[in-house]
Image: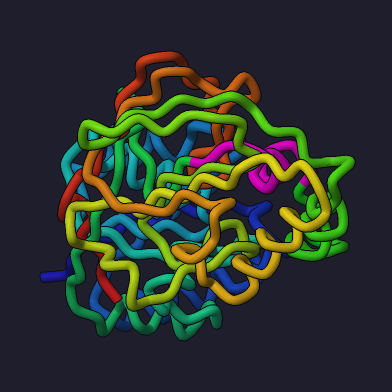
Amino acid sequence: MQKKLLLILNPVSGMRFGVLYTPKIISVLSEGGYDIFLMMTSKRGDAKNWAEKYGKDFDLIVACGGDGTFNEVVSGNLFGSKKPLGYIPCGSTNDFAASIGLSGDIPTAAQNIAEGSEHVFDAGSFGERPFTYVASFGAFTRTSYATSQNFKNIVGHLAYIVEGGLDLRNLKGEFVSLEAEGRKYEGNYIFGAVSNSTSLGGILSLSPDAVDMNDGKFEIMLIKQPENAGQLNKIIKAITSRQYLGCDMIEFFSCSELTVLKNPSGGWSLDGEFEEGADNITIKNLNSSIKLIY
């Protein structure tokens, strides 16, 4: 008996290769024993709504797009039937895919789903809203939702943020207060991330040795406001060397749950999508909540 697969495709993700390769994706998954039902998104929220509403009728739900598309499918699935998922990454950064080693070649990624086995990962909840791998605020993250997709495609996500971000004139910290495991962290931070990933925005990376994506814990990074070029150089050196623990300009620790006592005024980015946030909001690790086939 053929298994049923819901393919949710974002036609404008990244360089729009998902649309170009749609016939090949369908062919590969069909040869893998699936009856395919294709739905193409036209606006934000479509992928979440469809995964939640229709997921129960399928054996597997596959997201084809970027991190935002995958975030929506994960969110809808967590609120819905909690079915196994597949991910064909074709966005502009694909942080989650890079962290777990998914192929960037679209036909290969489809083939890996057709022939793959189940792997389990943590997700997170930001209040009532799920996220896949990162909730972040500050200098490097605003560009992820404020920059047009076409512009990111032209200049590259990394080049754009480095060119406009690592300059004292552009680095304006926000006062944020967090509490985790009985300890309070507060101050003016230019960047903060609650993550379950080795790659953040195509800019910051964590050592795979420091990240277990199914251990029930987040890695927390808070970068303090630099007051002079020397402090900025310390931050840049820590980022490029990934030696965060030895830098006095960076708070770096792990926890399973934290409370945002004072919310950043600029809001948050959840997997690249904007979230307003609020004071006294809780961020929780959802251990082993993503079942991914590859």
Residue 91 at what x, y percent from top left? 61, 61
In screen coordinates, is 147 left or right of 28? Answer: right
Residue 81 at what x, y percent from top left? 16, 41
Task: Answer with the quarter of the image where residue 2 lies.
Answer: bottom left
Which residue is pictured at 16% across the width and 50% down the height? 287
Q: Nearer the viewer, residue 193 or 5?
A: 193
Residue 221 at what x, y percent from top left? 47, 50
Which residue is pictured at 46% across the width and 85% down the height? 108
> Which stretch did the figure color magenta?
136-148
Residue 134 at what x, y percent from top left? 44, 48
Task: Answer with the quarter of the image where residue 129 lies.
Answer: top left
In this view, 26 is above or below 203: below
The residue at the far left in this view is 1
In screen coordinates, is 91 left or right of 208? Answer: right
> Is any part of residue 284 visible from this angle?
yes
Q: Quadrant of the C terminus?
A: bottom left
Which residue is pictured at 28% across the width and 39% down the height? 54
Task: Answer with the quarter of the image where residue 130 lies.
Answer: top left
